[in-house]
Amino acid sequence: MLTVLLFILFGGLAVGCAIALVAQRNPLYSAISLVGVFVSLACLYVMLAAPFIAAVQVIVYAGAIMVLVVFVIMLLNVEEEVRRPVRLFHLVPIAMGLAAVLIGETAFILTLRGASGAPQAPNQQVGLTSSIGTGLFTEYLLPFEITSVLILMALVGAMTLARTATVARPETPGDFRPDSGLKLVADAAGDGGGAVIQPGKTEETGRAMAELQIERGEAAAPSSRPPRGEG
Amino acid sequence: MIPLTWYLALSAVLFTIGVVGVIIKRNAIQMFMCIELMLNAVNLTFVAFSSYFGDLTGQLFVFIVMTVAAAEAAVGLGIIIAVFRNRESLDVDEASVLKY
C-alpha cells in the first residue's frame, strides 16, 4: 500500500524532526527542525485531500512565521543552552508511571474507537480551495472579518513592544519643549540669573543660554577667540 | 486506506513532544517554537477529522488557527526582543521577577 508507506514516511519525518526540535541546544537548528515538521505536515495534509491547507501551511508557517523566528534568532545572537543538573530527581519514577498510564489509556481509547463507525477514507471534495472559499465568505464571514481586527491588533502590539524607547533630548535651545530637561538647566542658576527661553526663537534663546553659561563659568568667553562678524 | 486513528495518534505524539519541549526548554525562542509545534499537532487533528467526516468546518478552523498563530508569532517575538533588550538573555529562568 503506497499510502501507508507515505504516511509512515511523512509521519516518521514529522516525529523525528519534532524530537530534534526539542533535543537541539542551538535555537537555529531547532528552527530548521521545525521547518521539517511543517513541510512533512503539509505532505500529510495533501494525503488528507486538503490541498489548500497544505499550501497555506507551507506559505504561512514555513514561509512567514519561520522567517520571522530565524530573523529574531539572528538578530539576538542567541547563545546555546547550557546543560544543567536535573532537579527533583526523585520524582522521575512517579512521572514515568503516570506517563505509562496515560499512554496506555490513549492507546486503549484509540484502538477501541478505531473499530467503530468512523469513515475510513478521506472526503475528496471538502478540502478544495473553491469549497473553502465558499464557506469562508458565506457562512463564516464574521470570523474572517474578526481575524482582520486581530491581525491589526497584533501589528500594533508588535510595533509597540519592539520599539526602542526614544529619549527626549533637546538638540538646540530653540527645540525647547515644556517637558524636556532644558528648563531645569536654565533655572539651576537660581532666581536671578536664569535665561529666558523663548520657544521658536532659536537665535535669541541660544545667545541667552550662551551668556548664562559664560556667567557661570561653564563656557569660555568669546573674547578669547577672534570675533567673527555677526549680522 | 489509512485509518483515522493513525492521524490522531500521530497528532497526539507531536502534541506531547511539544508539551515536553515547553516544559524542559529554558530558551524563550525554543519554547515559542514548541508552542508552534503544539498548534500544528492540533491542526493535524482538525484536518483529519474534517476530511474523514466530510465537514468543511475543521479546515476553516485550521485557517483561523493559522492566522492566530501568525499574530501570536509577531507579538511573541516582539515580547522576546523586549525581554532580551532588558536582560541581555533569553533564559526564562532569569526573567522571574513576576514570581515574587
Image: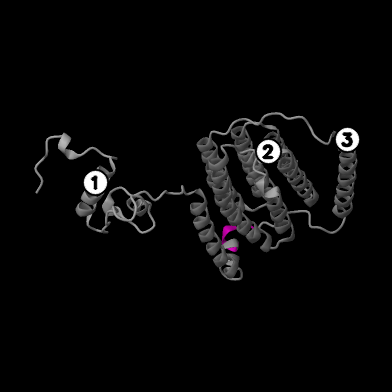
Cα distance in 3D space between marks 2 and 3: 21 Å
Q: Which residues are magenta?
A: A127-131
Quarter in which the N terminus of chain A is drawn? top right
Query: Label 3 is placed on what type of residue?
Result: His
Residue B76: x and y, percent? 59, 49
User: Is residue A105 rendered magenta in the image?
Assistant: no
What residue would you read off at disc 3? A90
Q: Within 10 Å of the Cα at label 3, are there few (<14), some (14-19), or many (20+) other Cα atoms?
A: few
Q: Within 10 Å of the Cα at label 1, are there few (<14), some (14-19), or many (20+) other Cα atoms?
A: some
* Main secondary structure of the magenta stretch: helix
Query: Label 1 is placed on what type of residue?
Result: Ala
Residue A181: x and y, percent? 38, 51
Chain of the residue on which disc 1 is drawn = A
Give the residue drawn at x 59%, y 37%. B89
What residue would you read off at disc 1? A210
Chain of the residue on which disc 3 is drawn = A
Residue A7: x and y, percent? 72, 42
Q: Nearer the viewer, residue A155 or A219?
A: A219
What residue would you read off at disc 2? B26
Q: Nearer the viewer, residue A155 or B43?
A: A155
